[in-house]
Amino acid sequence: MMIVRPVRTTDLPVLEQMAAASAAGVTGLTPQREYLFDRIQQSLAALESDIACQTEESYTFMLEVDGQVVGTAGLIASAGFTQPFYSYRNETLIHASAALGVNNKIHALTLCNDLTGVTQLCGFYLAPEHLGSAAADVLSRARLLFIASHPQRFSERLFDEMQGYTDSEGRYPFWEAIGKPFFKMEVEEVDRRIALGNKTFIAELMPTYPIYVPLLPDAAQQAMGQIHPDAEVPFAILTDEGFEADDYIDAIDGAPTLTAKTHWVRSIVHSKLARLCITDNRPAGTEPFLLSNLQTRQFRAGLADVLLHGDEAWVTLETAHALACEAGDQVRLVRFEGCAGGGFA
Amino acid sequence: MMLIRMARPDDLDALVALARLADVGVTSLQADPVQLAERIERSQRSLRNELDRADQGYLFVLECSETGTLVGTCSIESALGLRSPWYNYRVGKVIHASPALNIYSSAETLFLSNDHTGSSEVCALFLHPDWRREHNGGLLSKCRFLFMAQHPERFASKVIAEMRGVSDEQGCSPFWEALGRHFFTVDFAQADHLTGVGHKSVVAELMPKYPVYLDLLPAHARAVVGEVHEKTRPALAMLQEEGFRYEGYVDIFDAGPTIEAYLHEIRAVRQSRLWTVSEQAAVDAVAGEPWLIATTGLNDFRMVLQTLDAPQGSLSLDEATAQLLGVRSGDVVRAVPLHPPQDLSQVLP
């Protein structure tokens, strides 16, 4: 069975391996032992605390498949809480002259901090052999059930940054055109510095005036809003959840930033609470559901066959154990409608 | 002999013919009879002081006095941008520095500006290709400074000149292709024409209003910012000789430089002075140099070029020249050497 649970200190070695294997620049997965250790402690502390309103908490979850840890995903309660968070906002400017019968729509990018205070989905990594399975869906969407059960810990909007498009030589055309003239450094260096938690240099070096998109080289224009092939699965899952890629792009690589209103996200709005009932036999007429308990420290989420009968969710004992639940506990569940990120294993 | 005088209504046909020869890029001279007639009218009314400063403009012509052929023209606008906005890009600097990272980078940036609002402009100079010889170019260009020196109250303290920017033989401007084209879906020649017929502010409405980072433009577009068209180099040199300087302002379409000078610091204004005419028989100047000699009137402003030995006390003119200028012995003229003299003692009192 697939189970998502909060990270533990004992996960440090596996988290390190995942960070090393993940693409550069994934928020929350900087391949540094001290950094990852801190993230684990932050997650433990956040889950331990009784939080009435979101501040700088971050949460890290691990996905186990049949007892093996194969993936991780995280949440940052408020982006930009201690260091400013930068994005480019897509803007449309109309340059019109009635006298000349001209009406031009001009696409411009404005550096902004709009996503400050918004909850960020981050640190998504799944072992490649599981990418085509339901594991990606379970891992990504388990976070959404956690948000649904603990809304006071999160903001009214959510966002996730996708990994950007790179050319055949591994360069980001967007960075080459926009970033490099101002930063005079390679993107890896920027990612490294951001990961170390110092973003002041972005404010110091980034272009402050809007960028007119039509003036950019074709390669940079084409890279805007494009995702890396590795990001296709997370992208498909979140767009299926109702996230949209229209408003913001990443300030470094031009990749789309997906945003959504929290209460419009499919797994959140369609999830419901039910009372867990345990049956020894697998009952007839079950359907796959993504379900979670309502705990924090003992949070569990997983994919299981459930017979939903009124406000009773009938599951096997094995499922109840995996969810750290007993009969009569409240659970949150949402129908699992196949995976957005590949075939249903 | 070549004579500069104010344009008259009966010059219209000759001016239209002349303007037809002008290329794209001489924006303020269009071969449009209605527009040119209006310009002549405006010049005459300006001379009579019937117009507001905002509308005043002066149109000069260069004539071959023997044949009466009109071979060149130039203008002064008294005050720019007081009716519709006058636009330039200012090539500014934005410094991005991170002391912690030891990074310091200077980004050249184009800022849309109206900074030259109210300045006077010398413009619309065109000389027939067959007459681009001897001192005709200098005569045309610099006549305006003697006029301004004599009537400074009619002009602003700052004088500017827009120099034609780089374009290829097809009239295609690399700067326009990289910038303007994306905002204004016509070609450069058409935009240029619209500007020439007084639609510059309309065109400017379509141009980017936020600063544009030069580093983000293609190299071939960056390379022409502040550069003049090959054919404009002599005109640029002539104005530079008079003290005009590039101060970072460029045209919003072709990025040609706008050069500027304070009126009282223009060499021909500063060094010109009034002389009393003494008429005498034509004598070949021995060690002479070319001088610009202008009358002091408005409607009857005239200017010629004559080679003179350094004048002492009064300015000797031969009869033909005096007649052409309409002056007699005892009258006063304003004169200055065509080029900055090596020895200033010749002109400074």
Image (cartoon, coloured by chain):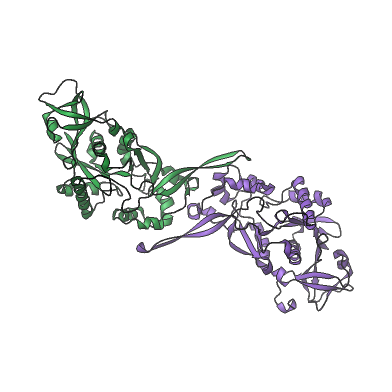
Residue B7 lies, in percent from the top left, at 80, 55
Q: Toward which corner of the image does residue A273 lie, by quadrant?
A: top left
Residue B348 lies, in percent from the top left, at 73, 77
> Drawn colour of chain B?
purple
Which residue is rendered at x = 64% and y = 55% of the image? B164
Horizontal side of residue A208 vs B194, given as left or right: left
Which residue is rendered at x = 63% and y = 40% of the image? A100
> Drawn colour of chain A?
green
Number of marks drawn = 0
Let me know if residue B170 appears in the view: no
Q: Residue lying at the far top in this picture: please name it.
A: A284
Which residue is rendered at x = 14% and y = 30% of the image? A328
Q: Residue lying at the far left in this picture: please name it.
A: A280
Q: Is residue B13 positioned above or below B318 on the image?
A: above
**Quarter of the figure with the C terminus of chain A:** top left
Which residue is rendered at x = 84% and y = 51% of the image? B10
The residue nearer to you, when weighing A103 against B285, is A103
Q: Is residue B148 positioned above or below A88 on the image?
A: below
Residue A218 lies, in percent from the top left, at 46, 45
**Quarter of the figure with the N terminus of chain A:** top left
Let me know if residue B85 appears in the view: yes
Q: Is residue A243 positioned above or below A86 on the image?
A: above
